[in-house]
Each structure stands twice: as C-alpha cells, then as structure tokens.
Image (cartoon, rainbow, N blue to C red):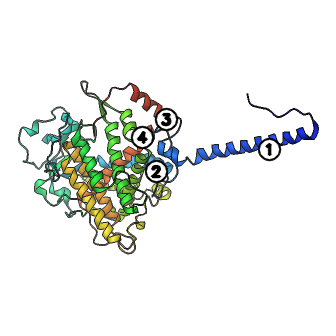
C-alpha cells in the first residue's frame, strides 16, 4: 500500500513534514500529467521506431507532418478518402487511362532470367476481340495461337494488345530521361487492359523475386540511408521504399487465400509483416504519395489542356471532367496546397552533377524491371516506375521561376502511368489507414492463419 500523509501531531515538526509531503505529491502529479500529455501529442522517437508501445507493433497512430513534406497525416487521410480516391477510382476505369503500352518481352540486361511463377495468375494474355469497343479492335499479330489460349475463364487476367491511332491524336512520343525503355519503339510494344490485370498476389517467390529488390537497393540506393546522406539521395530512397511498400500493400489486399477454392481476400498478417510493423515504410508510402500528387498538381495546366480522345465522345468528356476535378479540387488546394516542395532540392553547387547521378540510378532501376520473372509483376513494375519517372520529370523540368518550361512535353503513356501510380498509392494509403489500428486482429490472424508469406 502507498504511504499517506503523516498524522496531525507533534506540532511544528509534523506540520513541516506534512507540507513537504504535499509538495512532493503535487510535483509528482504535475510530472505525471506532463508525461501523459506529451506522450499523447508527441510520441517519442524511440516509440516511433518500434511502431508503438504495449507490445503491439504497428498499433501507433501516424500524426503530425509527413517528413520532408508539407502536409500532415490527418489531412492526407481525410483528403484521400473524401476527395482523391473516389476521383481516381473513376478516372482509371475510363478508356483513356485503362490501356497501357508496355514492353513485356525483354531480356534482362543484368542476369539470366530464372524467375518462375508458381501461379498461372503471373501471366498475361490477349483479350478476346469482342471484349473491346470498336476503336480498339485493330488486331495485334505478335502472339502465337498457343499463347492466346492462356487464362481461359479468368477475365481478370486477360490483356488488350491492340492499338487505335485515334487514341494517340495530339500526343507526342518522346523518351523519358528518367527511364530506360525506348517509348518510341512501337514495334516491341503491346497494349494491356489494366482493369483486367489487377496488381495482386501472383505466387512470384524465391531468389528471383528477392534479387530484384536487392539489386534496386544495393546498386542504386541504400537500404538504410545514413544521417549524413544528402537530401536528394534520401528522397530517392524514400520514393523507392514507398513504392515497395505500396506494392506489398496491394499483394496483401488482394491475396489468394485458398488456391483450391480460388478464394481471394485480405491477408492482414502479410500486411503487418511487410509494412505495418515498420513505421518507416508507412512514412515513406505517404511521402511517395505526396511527391506524386505534387507532380500531378504542378502539371495541372498541361494536363487540363491535353487531348483525351479515345473515339468515345461521352467517355472522353467524362475523362476531361474528372481530370479537372482532380487538378483543381478546392478542398485539396485549401487543405494541402503544396504537398511537396521540390524547390529545396538540387540547390548546392554540385546540384547539376548530383541530378545526373540520381537520374542515372533511377534509369538503372527502371531497367531492372526487365528482369522481373513474373509477367504481371513486370507489367505493374514498369508502369509504376514509369509513373514515378514521370513525376520526377515534371518536378525537375523547371525554369528560373519554378514553372514548367515551355518545351516541356508528356507522352500519353507517361500520363497514363502517372495517374495509375497515383491511384495505386491512394489505394495503399487508404488501406493502411483503415487497417493500421487493427493490430490485435492482425496479430491474431498472424498467429492462427496458415497462409503463405513468401510472395513478392
């Protein structure tokens, strides 16, 4: 039992002891209140690095400013759920943003491709001709009849590889200096319906899958950046880490729970193990989201005036309307007018040389996508790396007034990749926000679920 105040006896000496006892008790109470308030409002660095206290990794609530950005977590979550995610979900389902041009058949420039997918869901194949609107029915003859039979009965795995010249009216074809693919080489490109090829668990596992991320981090950016690293290289690491986190979130979001029953659903145990128990990975996801959002809003004038022509006037008008809603939403502009301030980068005397170095590193990362042994993983890897490269191109193609210069141009595929990447990141942020506080459920799932955890 705790000791109470001394009894009222023995005159002045006892009164002095009583005063000292009450003074000590008051000081202790003030100290406890101060600790309680500070722990609620400003979590300690050590608790953040552990992902929260009470033995519940991943249970912490993310609050305050997103590091190196200009918005706080609460604002990002609110604006994403209320404004951005609904717009992006509608936008990527429209014809203009649904079809992506990509090189799926490339030799790995770094090592022999030994990747093997465990599931047929790894692969993509050509969609039946009757699934597409008339403007998109120009045939593609690059596949053998045997390859066209794959994925029968699974519409989510079919792919559009057709081309209509009307779709590309008003768009230039120029290479992106941040990525390695030759976007002007149409002879090696195929066309993919992204809505029928969702980013999800594919069973792509083993050394080949691990080697991809090892090569990205070891050769091009450090896995654990040091404190004395320059701000630009830290930003590159955070972008790659954030993209890695987003990919992991989508695998966990759409996971094959029971292969025999073809049952898909959320794998919260995998989400916890890959992302939630590492606060830095969640923070980098938010950083990457705000970085790409800043690129989209910075290119607002350009994107508003672009021609979204697919030969379907009704759908094209809807696309233009949604693009304007995305670019000029008053709630976004008032709550988070500058998601990321790119003007603070490349300011030193070696800025130009550093920019060339990091640009080369990012080009290497984009080339590594040709080494992904899973076709569907390669598709989404290429799209999202191109989207990130497009964001870099937008943010760092500036004149002296920090505006896009007059020679700045985007090709259609870059815009498709950019918007789809922003949607992927938006979905990841939303899912992490919705499930991040459910650590007890995640731990319970982790304890009792027999699900596999080895996929990339």
Q: Secondary structure at mark 4?
A: helix
Report the Cα–Cα distance between label 2 and label 4. Answer: 18 Å
Report the Cα–Cα distance between label 3 and label 1. Answer: 37 Å
Identify the mark at residue 56; answer none if there is no mark. Answer: 3
Q: Are marks 2 and 1 in contact (CB under 8 Å)?
A: no
* Residue at screen point 11% across, 50% down: 138
Query: On the image, which quarter does residue 323 sit in?
Result: bottom left
2 or 3: tag closer to the N-terminus: 3
User: Does residue 437 lie above or below 93 as drawn?
Assistant: above
> Which of these two is toward me, 114 or 15?
15
Q: Secondary structure at mark 2?
A: helix
- CA neighbours of label 4 inside 10 A, class few (<14), some (14 to 19), many (20+): many
Report the Cα–Cα distance between label 4 and label 3. Answer: 11 Å
Is any atom of residue 311 visible in this view?
Answer: no
Residue tagged 4: 276
Q: Position of residue 117 (x, y in %)?
A: 19, 37
Residue tagged 2: 76
Report the Cα–Cα distance between label 2 and label 1. Answer: 45 Å
User: Does residue 261 lie above or below 321 as drawn?
Assistant: above
Residue tagged 1: 23
Report the Cα–Cα distance between label 4 and label 1. Answer: 44 Å
């Amino acid at each position: 039992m705790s000791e109470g105040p001394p009894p009222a006896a023995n005159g002045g000496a006892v009164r002095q002891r009583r005063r000292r006892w009450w003074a000590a008790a008051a000081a202790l109470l003030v100290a406890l209140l101060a600790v309680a308030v500070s722990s609620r409002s400003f979590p300690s660095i050590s608790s953040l690095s552990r992902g929260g206290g009470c033995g519940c990794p991943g249970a912490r609530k993310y609050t305050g400013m997103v590091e190196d950005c200009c918005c706080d977590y609460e604002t990002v979550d609110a604006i994403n759920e209320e404004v951005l995610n609904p717009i992006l979900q509608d936008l990527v389902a429209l014809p203009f943003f649904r079809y992506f041009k990509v090189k799926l058949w490339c030799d790995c420039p770094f090592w022999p491709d030994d990747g093997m997918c465990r599931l047929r869901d790894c692969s993509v194949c050509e969609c039946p001709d009757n699934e597409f609107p008339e403007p998109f029915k120009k045939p593609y003859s690059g596949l053998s009849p045997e390859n066209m039979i794959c994925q029968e009965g699974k519409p989510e795995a079919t792919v559009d590889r057709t081309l209509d010249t009307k779709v590309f009216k008003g768009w230039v074809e120029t290479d992106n200096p941040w990525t390695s693919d030759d976007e002007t080489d149409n002879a090696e490109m195929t066309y993919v319906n992204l809505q029928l090829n969702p980013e999800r668990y594919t069973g792509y596992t083993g050394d080949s899958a691990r080697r991809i991320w090892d090569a990205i981090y070891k050769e091009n950016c450090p896995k654990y950046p040091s404190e004395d690293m320059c701000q630009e290289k830290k930003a590159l690491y955070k972008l790659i880490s954030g993209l890695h986190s987003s990919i992991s979130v989508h695998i966990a979001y759409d996971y094959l729970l029971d292969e025999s029953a073809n049952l898909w659903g959320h794998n919260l145990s995998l989400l916890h193990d890959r992302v939630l128990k590492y606060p830095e990975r969640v923070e980098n996801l938010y950083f990457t989201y705000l970085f790409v959002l800043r690129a989209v809003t910075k290119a607002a004038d350009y994107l508003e005036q672009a021609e979204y022509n697919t030969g379907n006037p009704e759908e094209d008008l809807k696309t233009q309307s949604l693009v304007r809603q995305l670019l000029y939403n008053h709630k976004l502009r008032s709550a988070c007018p500058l998601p990321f301030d790119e003007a603070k980068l490349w300011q030193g005397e070696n800025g130009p040389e550093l920019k060339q170095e990091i640009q080369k590193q990012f080009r290497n990362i984009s080339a590594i996508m040709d080494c992904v042994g899973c076709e569907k993983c390669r598709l989404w890897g290429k799209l999202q790396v191109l989207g990130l490269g497009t964001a870099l191109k937008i943010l760092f193609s500036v004149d002296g007034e920090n505006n896009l210069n007059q020679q700045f141009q985007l090709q259609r595929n870059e815009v498709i990749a950019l918007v789809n990447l922003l949607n992927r990141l938006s979905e990841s942020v939303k899912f992490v926000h919705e499930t991040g506080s459910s650590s007890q459920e995640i731990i319970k799932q982790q304890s009792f679920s027999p699900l596999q955890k080895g996929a990339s």
